[in-house]
Image (spheres, rainbow, N blue to C red):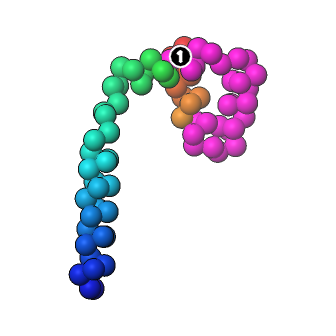
Amino acid sequence: MKVRYLLPVLLFSLLTTWAVAAQPAVDPTQARLAIVSDIAGLTHRDLESLSSQARSGDPEAQYWLAMVYAER
C-alpha cells in the first residue's frame, strides 16, 4: 500500500476513534427513568399491539413487553 493512501486511512481511523471515545457515557439512572416514563405513557391499544408483535416473534417487542411486566 502506498504511503499517500495509508496516511488518510490512518488519520480517519484516529479521528473516528477519538470521536467515539469523546461521547458521554449514558447514566443508567437516567436511562431507567426514561424507560419507566415510556412505559407509563402506553395506552391499552399500545399494549395490545406490543403483545401481538411479541407473540409474532419480534425480539424488540418481546424486550419491551418484558419491561412492561417488570414495571407493573
Q: Identify which residue is drawn at 56% across, 20% down.
A: 38
| Identity, as a three-letter code, of the amino acid under mark 1 | Ser
6 on left or right of 44: left
Q: Identify which residue is drawn at 31% across, 63% down.
A: 12
46 and 25: which is toward the camera = 25
Q: Identify which residue is drawn at 59% across, 29% down.
A: 65
Place residue 53 in its image quadrant.
Answer: top right
Q: Is residue 53 above or below residue 5?
A: above
Find residue 46 and report its horizontal and vertical position in percent.
Answer: 71, 24
Place residue 40 in its image quadrant.
Answer: top right
Q: Tag 1: Cα neighbours inside 10 Å, few (<14), some, or many (≥20)?
A: few
Classified by dominant secondary structure, the portion drawn in magenta counts as helix
Find residue 59 and report its horizontal and vertical position in percent.
Answer: 57, 43
40 and 54: which is toward the camera = 40
1 and 8: which is toward the camera = 8
58 and 38: which is toward the camera = 38
Report how many numbered discs are placed on residues in the image: 1
8 on left or right of 39: left
Mark 1, residue position: 37
Q: Is residue 24 above or below residue 58?
A: above
Q: Residue furthest front?
A: 4
Magenta run includes residue 60: yes
> Dividing the image into 4 quarters, which one contains the N terminus?
bottom left
Q: Identify which residue is drawn at 27% across, 64% down.
A: 11
Find residue 47 and report its horizontal and vertical position in percent.
Answer: 69, 24
> Dividing the image into 4 quarters, which one contains the C terminus?
top right
Q: Residue furthest bottom?
A: 1
Q: Is residue 43 above or below residue 65?
A: above
Magenta segment? 36-62
63 on left or right of 53: left
Find residue 30 and report its horizontal and vertical position in percent.
Answer: 39, 20
Magenta run includes residue 29: no
